[in-house]
Image (spheres, helix red, strand yellow):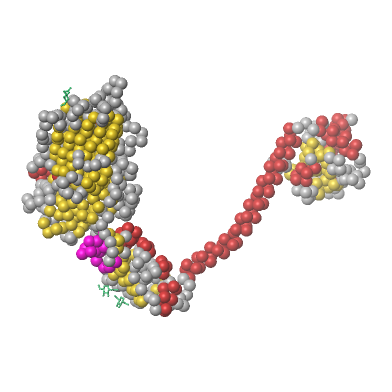
Amino acid sequence: MDYVGNGHKFPSTKICLLFKSCFIFFCLFTILFNSKLAAGYAYGARNLASDTPSGFISIDCGANEDYMDNGILYKSDRDFVDTGINQPVSPNISRNLRPQLKNVRSFPEGRRNCYVLKPENGKDNTYLIRASFLYGNYDRKNTTPIFDLYLGSNLWWTVDWDNGYVETLYTPSTDYITVCLFNTSKGVPYISTLELRHLDNTIYRTPARALVTMQRLDIGGRSNLRYPADVYDRIWNPLNVDTLNSSVTNSSISQGNNDAYKIPDTMLRTAAKEQNASCSLIYFWETQSSSAQFYVYFHFAEIEKLVGKKRRLKVDLTGQRNATTNATLDYLKPLSLSLNGTPDNAGQLQFSISAAEGSDLPPLLNGFEIYAAKDMRNASTVPVEADAMMGVKGAFKLIRNWEGDPCFPSELSWSGLTCSNSSASNILSINLSSSNLTGKIPASIANLREITSLDLSNNELTGEVPEFLVNLPNLRNLNLTSNKFTGSVPKALLQRAEAGSLILSVGENPDLCTSLKCPYNLKKYLALIIIACILAVLLPIVVFALVIYKRRRQRENLKREIEERLLKSKNRQVRYSEILLISDNLKTTIGEGGFGKVYYGTLSDKTQVAIKLLSASSRQGSNEFKAEAQILTIVHHRNLVSLIGYCDEAENKALIYEFMPNGNLRKHLSDPNTKALSWMERLQIAVDAAQVNKLQG
Ligand SMILES: *[C@@H]1O[C@H](CO)[C@@H](O)[C@H](O)[C@H]1NC(C)=O
Ligand SMILES: *[C@@H]1O[C@H](CO)[C@@H](O)[C@H](O)[C@H]1NC(C)=O
Ligand SMILES: *[C@@H]1O[C@H](CO)[C@@H](O)[C@H](O)[C@H]1NC(C)=O
């Protein structure tokens, strides 16, 4: 057996028949599924630097740890499968294998064992899924096992070879994709690698949810191509065309921005080309089937520099009407054509590429893909409920034999389930009595709209009996006997039980209140009440504080403005409204002078001021007021109280002085308490006052 080697080999491939009529046939009698694995995986250096691309799930089945290989992160399968055992392949061949193939996971127990993949993009997206198998005498029995491979509840392939892979473009209807191995009593099933790649949804059509890859060929290529050359990690096998005229370019093919096919440059640089424009390139393949529908994708790029003309081609599927497509090639521009849903022609598929009518340039072909449509819309559990059951399985980790589709195939439906008798099955009942379950009732049960019976008795389930059970319209039997539920049974359930529409068993749950007169769940309500009270008290306070704070801010800002003006402007004139602000609406009277009352005020920088307001009944008139204001704004002296500003509006006149916290002089001079001012101090004051008078005079 040839496990290594550089060139790809189709074991029973023959490039055959070179017709004299210049028709060139290259025919293949086999299909991709048994292409040799070792060749299918071009060996590459380990590359730890680059991150694995998004939309890829790469599982090395049977591996003990994760690792990078060729820019792809391969994960151990322990998070994707619950069953099976790791086994290395025979050391005789192991040495030369890529790491993915050095071990397998085999499934000696159970009829069905499944991997569960959960791609980020979820359902209704198209994925390339590839499963690889290299027997490698892992069980030392020298007998290749034969077993069935399923995607969901659909048979995918019967694996009856010892070295190869099977690949499918799949558009699942659920967020989970299950890949299951079925033991058909012909040896223990095993698997080497499982790979999933998210594709652009616009390129390949999957009308019945799946296209099985038959051939993907790089004409004139020298070795296999895959990631990173192909961003989708499609594997391109070289088709050796030594007997044909092959054409090669070293120029890079410019990928159009919106070319979703993203055909690898290297693939497009080689092509098969006819010499004579009146000849065709003909490909012939025995499909070994008579009912399949084929999807063929042709990939072209002009790799010859033609002056003044363009190659125009015609693609024909022999024996098919209306299966002709024309194409005009531009230099170094990729072009892909698809022929969809072609029935095979009595077990054969044959196409020809020729010059289009009126074109004198011979035809050319760079590569192509052939897929067989596969109906993967088999009977299955309705997607929402299949996802819900995956949720239940995840929550109750203990359950065995819950693998693949919950209801199908019916002889392998999950133990404890009954399903409705239709091609899209609903879950009708779940019986997990005495299953050592712990934890809470999983919320995903709420999605099982048709369920009539739920038996979870004799387990160790905790938490509350969830309210959502009330909303299951068809539930007739609910058995929660003998668990560790707490809280109280939802009232609506008890009412339904009383009305006779539900058989409710909730006994032997010591901490569960099972009557209609259950006290309110104190803990829950107390917490709510306390929070409500705190909010009721706090909210007005917070609002009030905010309002006050905002007002104060406004006032402070205004004050600062006034002060700035007082400091900067020469005349230091302020408005009456500002006087009111500074004095807090004339709140504090600190004395009475010749003009009228004197008020206390503060500026925003906390400078204290005294505000003399000219009262209407003042003995001194407005002329005197003006004189004082003008003099004081000019005169500055150490012993003179300094004027900070004044207000001179028709009725309202005021002077703003620096505030003297010790009161006025007269009071101190006439204070009977002799200690207030000593004689020396009084003398000094007299001298200072005289100086001021001299200044003023
Ligand atoms: C192309 O093929 C046609 C038909 O076989 C033949 O008559 C013609 O001479 C060929 N032309 C060349 C350039 O070989
Ligand atoms: C669930 O299964 C147990 C035994 O496995 C059985 O005794 C019980 O009756 C079943 N419950 C229902 C609702 O059928
Ligand atoms: C509920 O489960 C318990 C324990 O499994 C069983 O004894 C009882 O009969 C069940 N009740 C009903 C109504 O099925």
Picture quadrant of residue 664? top right
Picture quadrant of residue 691? top right
Q: Nearer the viewer, residue 519 or 284?
A: 284
Q: Position of residue 38 (x, y in %)?
A: 15, 40
Q: In this rendering, does residue 377 appear at all?
A: yes
Q: How many marks?
A: 0
Q: Position of residue 327 (x, y in %)?
A: 29, 32
Q: In this rendering, does residue 440 appear at all?
A: no
Q: Residue furthest right?
A: 619
Q: Position of residue 73 (x, y in %)?
A: 27, 43
Q: Is residue 410 magenta?
A: yes
Residue 272 lies left or right of residue 431; in this view the side is left
Residue 524 lies left or right of residue 336; in this view the side is right
Q: Position of residue 642 (x, y in %)?
A: 79, 36
Q: Nearer the viewer, residue 322 or 495?
A: 322
Q: Which residues are magenta?
A: 405-420
Q: Residue furthest top?
A: 307
> Residue at left 12%, top 59%?
185
Residue 51 lies left or right of residue 587; in this view the side is left
Q: Main secondary structure of the magenta part?
A: loop
Q: Nearer the viewer, residue 14 or 381?
A: 14
Picture quadrant of residue 309? top left
Screen quadrant of the C terminus: top right
Screen quadrant of the N terminus: top left
> Residue at left 83%, top 45%?
598
Which quadrant of the render holds ligand 1? top left
> Residue at left 27%, top 71%?
434
Q: Is residue 347 magenta?
A: no
> Residue at left 30%, top 72%?
458
In this rendering, the answer to whether 510 lies above or below 192 is below
In this rendering, the answer to whether 465 lies above or below 136 is below
